[in-house]
Image (cartoon, rainbow, N blue to C red):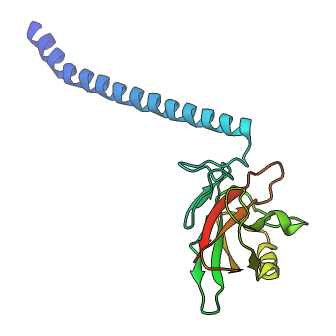
């Protein structure tokens, strides 16, 4: 009988150790899953404190004092991304810039309010400094492109045509997409020429 007990002990010992191993693996998976869920909950709580309309930028903030450059993207906490392209010179002395709105939020977005004036604006100069005059040539076209709601998960590109008084004129493009509460304005600093 001692031999049978010894045989049974050796037969169950690998099974017992593999059960212990799998138990540890499952415990580690559960721990890291709970940790990830906790981190996500804290992030969402933080977003709720300062609002979805805040810019969430690595590097330059997109503010007046730290404007973004051409070809960069302003990222909002609710998932909206706004990208302004590099200016392209046309033969007639005008410049074309595109503003792309990418709706990564969980709802349809209205890009234009009853009053369009706040969504997209062009200011001559840089950092509060006045600059040369810049004419915005297609204001009406921009208003009509922004008018329909932007469905969740889609993007819309808005063409902007500008004519500066001189080559090399600095321009600040201000983008403030409408939001039911508050949304920060993203400033993009461009040089036409």
Residue 172 falls in image quadrant: bottom right
Q: Is 174 placed above or below 193 here?
A: above
- Residue furthest toward the bottom? 91
The quadrant in which the C terminus is found is: bottom right
Which of the pair 79/56 is nearer the observer? 56
Q: Name the spot of residue 85 as percent of width and height, x first.
A: 58, 71
Instruction: Check the image and name the residue furthest to the right.
Output: 114
Residue 157 at x, y = what percent?
A: 66, 74
Q: Is residue 120 left or right of residue 170?
A: right
Q: Residue at x 78, y 73 (%)?
A: 146
Q: Position of residue 169 (x, y in %)?
A: 64, 73
Q: Residue 59: x and y, percent? A: 53, 49
Give whichever of 188, 100 is nearer the camera.
188
57 displayed left or right of 108: left
* Image point (68%, 50%), residue name: 78
Residue 176 as seen in the image, left or right of residue 46: right
Regarding residue 103, the answer to whether it shows in the image is no
Visible residue check, residue 43: yes
Decide which of 2, 18 is in the foreground and name it.
Answer: 18
Q: Check the image and report above or below for 80 versus 22.
A: below
Quadrant hosting residue 37: top right
């Amino acid at each position: 009988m001692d031999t049978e007990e010894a045989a049974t002990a050796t037969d169950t010992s690998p099974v017992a150790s593999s059960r212990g191993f799998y138990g540890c693996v499952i415990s580690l998976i559960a721990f890291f899953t709970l940790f990830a869920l906790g981190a996500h909950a804290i992030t969402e709580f933080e977003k709720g404190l300062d609002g979805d309309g805040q810019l969430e930028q690595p590097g330059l903030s997109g503010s007046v004092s730290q404007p973004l450059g051409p070809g960069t993207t302003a990222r909002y906490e609710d998932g909206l991304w706004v990208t302004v392209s590099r200016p392209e010179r046309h033969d007639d002395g005008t410049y074309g810039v595109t503003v792309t709105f990418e709706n990564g939020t969980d709802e349809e977005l209205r890009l234009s309010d009853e009053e369009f004036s706040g969504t997209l604006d062009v200011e001559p100069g840089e950092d509060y400094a006045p600059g040369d005059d810049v004419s915005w040539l297609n204001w009406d076209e921009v208003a009509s492109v922004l008018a329909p709601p932007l469905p969740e998960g889609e993007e819309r590109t808005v063409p902007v045509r500008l004519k500066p008084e001189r080559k090399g004129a600095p321009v600040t493009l201000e983008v403030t997409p409408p939001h039911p509460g508050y949304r920060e304005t993203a400033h993009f600093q461009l040089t036409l020429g």
